[in-house]
Amino acid sequence: METNRRAESLRQEIAGWEDLAGATRQLAELAELAKESRDDSVAADVTKQLAALNERYRQQELLVLLSGPYDEAGVFLSIHAGTGGVDAQDWAEKLERMYLRFAEKMGWRAEILDRNSGAEAGLKNDLIKISGRWAYGYLKSEAGVHRLVRISPFDAEAMRQTSFALVEIIPELPNQEAMEIKDEDLEYNFSRSGGPGGQNVNKTSTAVRLTHKPSGITVTAQTERSQYQNRERALAILKARLFAAAREASAHELKEIKGVAPKAEWGKQIRSYVLDPYQLVKDHRTNYETVDVGAVLDGQLLPLMESYLRHEVQQSVAQST
């Protein structure tokens, strides 16, 4: 089934480039006609069609920018509330909704694998699996600290508050690339699941908490009905995290990887979302800005992601020259 979906996706991609090439040839012929006839109405039509053609090319060009080794893969996306107390936990929940809405708009499947709610509001942390072609390629731009400035709904004096949340993005690895882990390096803890699954969930210890002892990395899975299924899912997530860590650290540094992650606090943000005293979303890596904060929080993230992808290519080219 997965092979069929990928084949269909590739056929659509090829067809898109072929259609674009055909439209370009037709527009070139029309431009030549406008030149020969000196007809202003034809020239105006050429200008209009050229703008539309440029937009189509820009969309197709994104597929070229998504050329990383895991850009086509799904992702494990986790959100952690940072500095800001209950406001940060509420902010983490808003980010969760934003990414779920984005996945929905892209036609991808999103599944919450683990979620720890805040005592008063929002969430402390969660883990979401998002499955779909190019999911990692787009969502890798979201890794880092996200900053929110607003009038706090939890402050009786309606004071302006700044909150932070950390987003981590890990690609879902193909089976053939998953890391091998020694059994003696793993520690399992089992408990009753608090997630969906019917009455059986609360009567048996199906939830799995898996710790990789050398690195200290811990993952939890509790959404499946059986302990075996949750164990396999936790192991897959752990392998993906270890693989991502191994790409950034040497083997002897792997045990310290938890200390490498940026803290969700002042000065660390990749993006700011300002709701008061003005409306603005700004990506601090690319300087892309938009005043349509509501649309961004509703999952309209493609312009931000496209800006990031183009920025990364430009940085890469600059470093190679």
Image (spheres, rainbow, N blue to C red):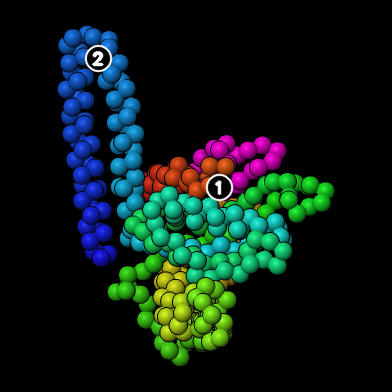
N-term-proximal mark, 1 vs 2: 2
| Residue 279 falls left or right of residue 23 | right
Q: Is 86 part of what is drawn in magenta?
A: no
Q: How far apart are marks 1 and 2 (CA)?
A: 42 Å
- In the rendering, at what x and y percent does residue 82 appear? 65, 61
- In the rendering, at what x and y percent does residue 193 appear? 55, 79
The disc label shown at residue 297, or none: 1
- The image quadrant where one finds the C terminus is top left
Q: Which residue does the numbered mark 2 point to in the structure image?
A: 42
Q: Is 284 part of what is drawn in magenta?
A: yes
Tell me the residue at 35%/75% (across/down). Answer: 178
Residue range in magenta is 271-293
| Residue 116 falls left or right of residue 251 | right
The disc label shown at residue 284, or none: none
Instruction: Looking at this view, name the residue that lies furthest to the bottom.
Output: 184
- Quadrant in the rendering for residue 15: top left
| Residue 282 falls left or right of residue 302 | right
Tell me the residue at 66%/37% (across/down). Answer: 278
Q: In this view, does 297 lie above or below 243?
A: above
Q: Which element type, helix, strand or loop, lies under badge 2? A: helix
Q: In this view, does 95 lie above or below 21?
A: below
- In the rendering, at what x and y percent does residue 184 appear? 46, 91
Disc 1, disc 2: CB below 8 Å? no
Mark 2: amino acid? Val
Tell me the residue at 64%/49% (across/down). Answer: 148
Tell me the residue at 60%/39% (across/down). Answer: 280
Mark 1: amino acid? Leu
For disc 2, the neighbor class at 10 Å (few under 14, some 14 to 19, many from 20) is: some
Q: Can residue 97 be seen here?
A: yes
Q: Which of 155 and 309 is in front in this view?
A: 155
